[in-house]
Structures are given as C-alpha cells and as structure tokens.
Amino acid sequence: MTYALATAVTAHPGPSGVPLAAAAHGFLSPTGVEIAFLLVGLLTFGAALVTVTTRQLVHAALWLVVALGGLAVEYLLLTAEFIAWVQVLIYVGSVVVLLLFGLMLTRAPIGRSPDADSGNRWAALAVAVAAAAALVWVVVDAFRTTWIDLDGPAAGSTEVTGASLFQHWVLPFEALSVLLLAALVGAIVLSRKARAEKSSPPVNSRASAGGSPVVPESRNHPSGGHRPTEQEGAR
Amino acid sequence: MHLAYPAVLSALLFCTGVYGVLARRNAILVLMSVELMLNAVNLNLVAFDVWLSRTAEETLHSGQALTLFTIAIAAAEIGIGLAIVLAVYRNRGTSDIDKLRDTAEGHGSGTDGDAPAAEKAEATA
Amino acid sequence: MTTTTLAVLVPLLPFLGAVAGLLLGRTAPGFVRPLAVLPTLTAFVLAVLVAVRQGGDAAVDAATELTPTGSVPVYLALHIDGFAALVAVLVGLVASCVQIYSTGYLRDDPRYPSYAALVSLFTSAMLLVVYSGDLIVLLVGWEVMGICSYFLVGHYWETPEARAASLKAFLVTKLGDVPFLIGLFALGTDAGSFRITRVLGTVAHGGLDHPTVIALLLLAGVAGKSAQFPLHTWLPDAMAGPTPVSALIHAATMVAAGVYFIARLLPVFEASAAAMVVMAVMAAVTMTGSGLAALAQDDIKRVLAYSTIGQLGYMTGALAVGDRGAAVFHLLSHGAFKALLFLAAGVVIHAAGTNSLAAMSRMSGLRDRVPDAYWTMTVALLALAAIPPFSGFFSKESVLGAAEHVTAGHTGHVPAATGWIVLVAGLVTAFLTAAYATRLWLLAFRGHGAQAPDHGRQPLTMTVVLWVLAVPSLALGGLAYRTLPDWFDGGDLAPTLTTSVLGTGVALIGGLVTYAAWRHLTGLAARVPLGAVAAHPEGDAGQVEAEAIATHAPAYGDVASAPDPADPGRLLLGPLHRHAAVGFHLDAVYTALFVRPVLAGASLVRFLDREVVETYVRGAGVLPRWLGAAVRRAQTGNVQTYVSALLAGTVVLAVAAVLVATGA
C-alpha cells in the first residue's frame, strides 16, 4: 500500500513544482549537511531512548542533556541559530537542573532502581511503536520529495527572529510574560503550603488549612524527619 | 536538505516521549519524557518554518516564534509540574505515578498507595 | 314554588347539610347537630308537600340535559309518581327520626360529625334514587348509598367485626352491582334512552330485544342491594354498625331501594316470564330461609336483620306476582315498623348492656326500665307478625292476596306457578315470622332472674321518636289501604277473606307454639346461668352497643348464636337449629366457592411473580452486572493506563482517517 501511495504521489506533480527539485536531490546522494544531520539525529534519538529506558534516574537526566543538546545542534544545522542558543540556555541550562533538583528533593535513589518502569511498560511500548510507525509512514509518504533549500541568509538568525517576534508577535509575547508570572506565583504557592504545614503541628495545620486534603498521620511522620533538608535544597 | 529527515526524527522523538510518559514510574522521569515530546514538536516547527520561509516567501516566521513560546511555556510547565510532584511527594511519601490511585473504584490491589486512598474516601464520605 | 323546585330541594338539602357537616365538623362542633337534623327535617316536610301536591295524579316529569354524553343521552330528570312521592315521605320520616335519635344515641361519640354527615349524604342519595327519572342518575345515588353504607357499618372500626362486616357488605353488594350496571347499559341501549318514561314506553310497545337477560342482570343488582338470596349474607353482619344506621339503611330504606327499583321498572321484568319465576323462587327461598335463621339468632339485632330479609322477600314476592302496589305498600309499612323495631332495640341494648337474647332472658324488670321501648316494640312486633289491626297485617295481606289472585289465573302476564310459590312461602313465613317475633318479645321482656342494670332514664330524643314511629306502625295499614290504590296503579289492596284467615291463623299458631315452648323451658333458663353485660352506666348507647358486639363472640363463642338450652327457637327448630344459626352455611359455601379460589389464585399469582417472572428479571440483571464488573476492572485508577488507552485509540483513529482519506 505504501508503494502504491508513493507512486500515486510521484505520478501527480505537486502544485509548487517541487518534483523538479526532488529529482535533483535523491536520498542516495546526501549532502554534507544531511550526513551531519543524520549522525546528530541518531545520537539524539539514541540519547532519548536511553533517557526513557535507563534504570538510573540521574543518568536519565544526564542523557536528557545529551538529547536536548543534540537537538540544539540540529537547530543550528537548520540555520535556526537563535532557537538553538535559547534551547541550550533554557533546556540544558535550567530545565535539566530543575529536574535534577526535583530528583534530589524526592529522594530518588542513586544507582540502579529496578522498579523504574511501571507495569504498563508493554502497553506503552505497543502504543509508542504503533504511533511511531503511523507517524513515520505518514510523514515519509507526505514529504519524501520536499526539499529545504538551506543556502542563502540564515532563516533563524537573531536579527530575523527578533524582528519577527517584535513586529508580529508582540502581543502573544507579552501575554506569555503574564503566563510566566502566573507559573512563578503558582509554583511559589504550591511550595509555600508545604512550609506552612511544617511550621505548625500537623493537627492544627489541618484545621487551619481548612479544605486541605486530610492526610493520615502515619504518612506525615516518616517524612517529617528529613523535611528541613528538603527545604534547604529547595532554597 | 530533505524535509523528511527532521520530520522523521521529530516523529521518533515524540514517540520515545510517549513511551516514557506511559512507561516510567517516577513522576520526574515522566516530566522528562514530556520535555522530549515538546522538543520533538519544536523540531518540527523549526524545520517547517525554515522550509516555508524559503519556498512560500512567508515572512512571519511563525514557526520559530511558536518554538520560542513553546520553550517558555515548557519552562513554566516544568516549574509547576515539579512543584506538584514535590507536594505529592510530601503528602504521600512517594512520587510513583502508579501508586496514586485515588480515583480507582474499590481497592483490591493492596499496595501502599491504596491504604491512604481508602482512608481518604472514608474521611470525605 | 313549583312542585319541581320542591322536589329538587328534597335531595339537595341533606346533601348540602352533609357537605356543611363535613366541613364544619371539626371547627364548629356546636353546629353539627342542627346541621344534621334540620336539613333532613326540612327535606321530610318538603317531601310531604310534594306528595300532597302530586296527590296520586299524573306523574310529575321534568328533565334537563346537563351536557351531551355520547350515544345515549343522560338527563337530570325527575319522575315523581305516587310510588316515588310516598317512598320519599317514608325516607324523610325515618331519616329525620334516625337523625334525632342519633343525637342521643351517639351523644359522646368523637366521630359523631362525620357520622351525621354520612347519614345526611345517605339520605340525599336515597331521595335521589327515589325521585330520579333517569337510570344513570339513579345509579349514582345507588352507588353513593353503597359507599355510605360501607362507611357507616364500619363506624366502630376499632372492632374487627365491624371492619370485616363493612368490607363484606361492600364486596357483596358490588358483586350484584356489576351485573346491575351491565343490565342498565343493555336496557338503555335497547330502549335508546335512560329516561324511565321512555324505557317504559319502549317496553309497552314490545321494543326490548333481550328482556330476560336484562331482567336477570338487573335482578342480580337488586338481590345484592335488597339482601335477597343468595346475596343476602352481608346484611346480618352489617348489624355491627350503630343501631340507628341499621334502622335507617339496613331496615327501612336502602335495602328497600332494590324493591323500589323493580317496582319502578316492573313492566321490564314482566316482559320476561322467566325473570318473574326466578324472582318468585328467590323470594320464596329468602323468606323461608331467613325466617328459620331468625329463630336461631341470639343477637337481637341479627334477629331483626333476618326478619328484614324475610320482609324484603315478601316485597319481592309481591313484585314476582306483578303487584307493585302491594310491594310498595308493604315497603312503607315495613319501613315504619322495622325502623321502630331497630330503634327500640337500640334502647333495649343500652338498658340491658348486652345484645344477647340469652342474657336478656335471665334478666327481670327490663320492661320497667324502658317502658317506651317495651310498648312501642310490642306494637311493632305485632305489626311484624301481621296481627290485625296493625299495619303489617294489611300490607302483608295485600301481598298474599295478590299471590292468591295470580294462582286463580286471573292475570295473563304472570304464570300461575309464581303465585303458588309466593303464596305457600308467604304462609310458611307468616308462621315463622310470628314465631320469632314472639320469641324475641318473650326473651327480651319476660326474663326471670337478676334485676336489669339501671342505666337511668333514656334520653328524650331516643324515646320520642319511638312513639312517632309507633303511630304509622299501628295505624298506617288500616287507614291507608283504601286510599293507597289511588296513588298506585289502582289495584285493590284490601285484605281478602281467605288469605286473611289463613295468614292470621298461621301467625297465631306460630305465636302460640313459641309461647308454649317458652313456658316449657322457663324452668331450664334459671338453672343455666349465662350472660355477659357491658357495664357502662355513664357511657352513651353507642359505646355500650359497640362493646356488646365486640364481646359477643368471646362470651358466647359465636357472633350469631349462644349455647342457651332454654331458647325456644332451639326446641322448635330441633336439629335444624345448628344450621340456621350460621345462616345455613351460606358463608361457608361462599368461602369454598369464591374466597378460597381467589386466595389460591392470589397465591398462585404471587408464586408466579416471585419465582417465575422475577427469575427472568434477575436473569436479565445478571448480564449487565457482569458487564459492569468487567468495565469496572478497567477503572484501575492508574493514569498511565488511561493515557495508554487514549493514545492507542488516537493512533487507531488517525490511521483509519488516513486510510479513508487516501481511499485505501
């Protein structure tokens, strides 16, 4: 069926005249950029796979750094340099650090943890493989002949991106700042509740918290001993 | 460059993220997988933006702008998500997703997460 | 005011009194007694006026159609002939007496307001039946009477006897009312109208297609209402109601409604010779059987109840020989003296503190305690036994005379056989009637033994009405038998020599035989102590009576009879006594024929419902329950499972969409 689809696509010339370009650029004669993209892509994909399969939780975060860094390189190869640096700054610089903090605050075990994967693993694998097959099939079918011309001025230079962002996307940009503020406040609120709970005895705190969830005391006591360290870590 | 390369890579990364979201037990690892999925989408956006900016002479650069927005939202999301995970961890002493089963009917499995759930149901009833 | 307006007011006034009594009964207790007595009394006066104006001339007819009601129109119609006018006077008289009597009898009863309102409502319904010129309107009154009877029999609903009796009365009369309704519809369809005048006109022209079926169906309803064999069994049990109610409803008026109905539509019945024969046989069986049963009863009111059944049998017999004048004549005189008997019996029960004749026969001086009741009851019993010159003699002789007239074959449309049946049964019943009347009188007032308890003077309201009713009991027959034919069909009501001698002879023989038996047994009574007396010197008569009824079965072992060897009825009846006491086992027959099959059917249906139908229902519930259990297993509470299913579904949908889009 895929073959038939492919022939159908090639039989009908696209509306934008792409088939001419596609004819000039076959998959069997890759350019240098493509080779680099492929290699980095393989590295990224591999790092992502390790991230979701490794049993050592801290390693997963580190492999995530590799995957995200690889993606930054891919952005560079696609001439989107500003995005690439933003990617490095925000993802590699802050998000992964946050995740590592999270791992530490939840007392994630260092070293191999045999129960890193839930019992849902095989269903997840089936769904993921099926989704991958479907997506790859559709994408390949649709874009096998599409060619990106990477010559000329960079499509994602800082200048171009900045001009576009502040000419056409000002309003969403400002709205986004509000969203970030809201997220900031939200994160603080979520963290503060825990601190208020800690400063007073558990029974009173429940009474003062009003509608806060009723938690059995047996849950509070074992975690009570190590809370000061958590708090320090959070700060 | 063929558009198929970034598109396929994006699809594969996305599905890897899906697998991670569905299979990982630790909530923070699930958040990592979510980051993977978001990045896959970003790659798609960038690749198509580059392609369209050359062929269709569109000048809005909407793909790259949206990528930036996505990155910002992802940063916010990771902050909130981690705060929630921490709150859950403080309440329950665990951040394992498959132990948070308060919505299940009946409590037949007898795992650690079920006992407080049962008590909670009684307390609210 | 025209006669029509007056006639409309007659049923309307008690109805308004009933409504007002029901509304004001709780809020204004002071108005209850005037509201009960005055409308009924006014209605009586108006009924007398209507009777005077009508004067036995041509019938007064008036009709208005309220609204179109489909195929056969229903009219609010009046049809007042001599029968209607006189029966209305009787109803008004008895109802007024009963209302006055009840003010004393139920003096302290907490439910007196509703009782009085129901009696008023009953009076209104009965007057409606009497005056109505339309069969459907008549049916309305007929059924309202039935429901009032149900409520009033169950007035002492604290006692199980009263509850059972009210239900029995309702069910048995309904058993007759269903064929009655069908018969009315058949009659209306055949005649094309429910107006009595048109129906009679159709009958006169021979326009009825199914006279026998219609007559027999109507006869079933009449048998239920007028307590004729085999639907009479409710009437003795209905004595569990208060005595005034028994006097009004179960002696003088409601039970006479069936007879009155036949009298109105006699040509319809005469159109079918078979119906007349059936009626004659029914009357004969009713008369003799009830006479025998009355001899065996111990409860004074049950004696009177069986006597009522027998006297109604006389009326039916008169109708069976085609003389409605005689029937209504007997209805009028019987209504007067039977109401008197019941009301006097109420006084006697109050004074004696018991309703048992066996207990009264061991009590001396009862007649000195209640002289009014003694003298009036003597008059009424003589009237009942048809001793000249009391009114019962003339009316009963008119019935026997009509029967004898038919045996001679002078009338064409009535078979001579019916005449013989009615005549023979009537003479036998005359004997029995005299016997049980004598027994009642002797046992109640000629007892020997301890002094009767002193309950003080009876209330004036209760004794005055006895004398009021004693007047027609004494004199109505002798004064009226000459003038009544002008009001009726014109047939001669004067007693003939043959039947007078025969009837009076057997009555005297019956009385003397009973007296002899009583004399023979007097010594025995003193040796066998018996009796239980309800001692409520302060209580009103109704309370004493309720207690007496409730204690009869525990004290004597049965509601109807007492194990009294000194009872003259026991000697006279011999081995028959045992069967007569329980009404010749008719209740047992009904139990075997109807009650047990119905109960068995009910338990069968219950079994089918519980075990068979419900099994299917439960089986139908099992599959959804299994499905629910299966679906419930999917609700694990694990978010990852949910998302997995969600994404899998998404993939499937996406693939399907792609495949459809590409036309594969």
Image (spheres, coloured by chain):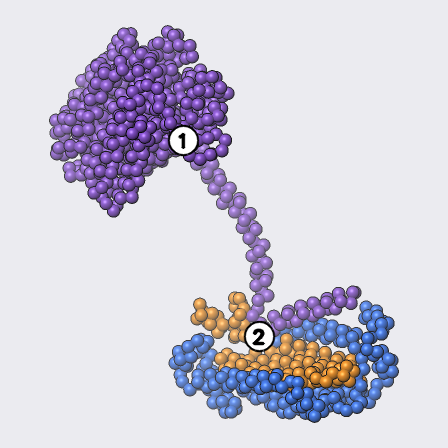
**What residue appears at the point 54 percent right and 49 percent down from the top-left corner?**
C617
How packed mark 1 is, by other alpha carbons closer than 10 Å (few <14, some 14-19, many 20 or more), is: few
Q: Which chain is purple?
A: C
Which residue is situated farthest in the front direction here?
A: C1
**What residue appears at the point 29 percent right and 25 percent down from the top-left corner?**
C50
Quadrant of the frame with the N terminus of chain C: top left
Left or right position of C451 against B84: left
Q: Where is residue C593 drawn, in percent x and y?
A: 43, 29
In the displayed structure, would residue C477 be above or below residue A117? above
Q: Where is residue A80 drawn, in percent x and y?
A: 72, 89
Q: Which residue is mark 2?
A: B98
What mark, if any, has residue C64 been given in the picture? 1
Q: Can residue C253 be seen in the rendering of this structure?
A: no
Rendered hue of chain B is orange
Q: Where is residue C334 drawn, in percent x and y?
A: 27, 22
Q: Secondary structure under badge 1?
A: strand
Q: Quadrant of residue C162?
A: top left
Output the chain of dot 1.
C
**C382 or A24, which lies in front?**
A24
Q: Report the amino acid beneath label 1.
A: Thr
CA–CA distance in space, label 2 to label 1: 85 Å
Rendered hue of chain A is blue
Q: Secondary structure under badge 2?
A: helix
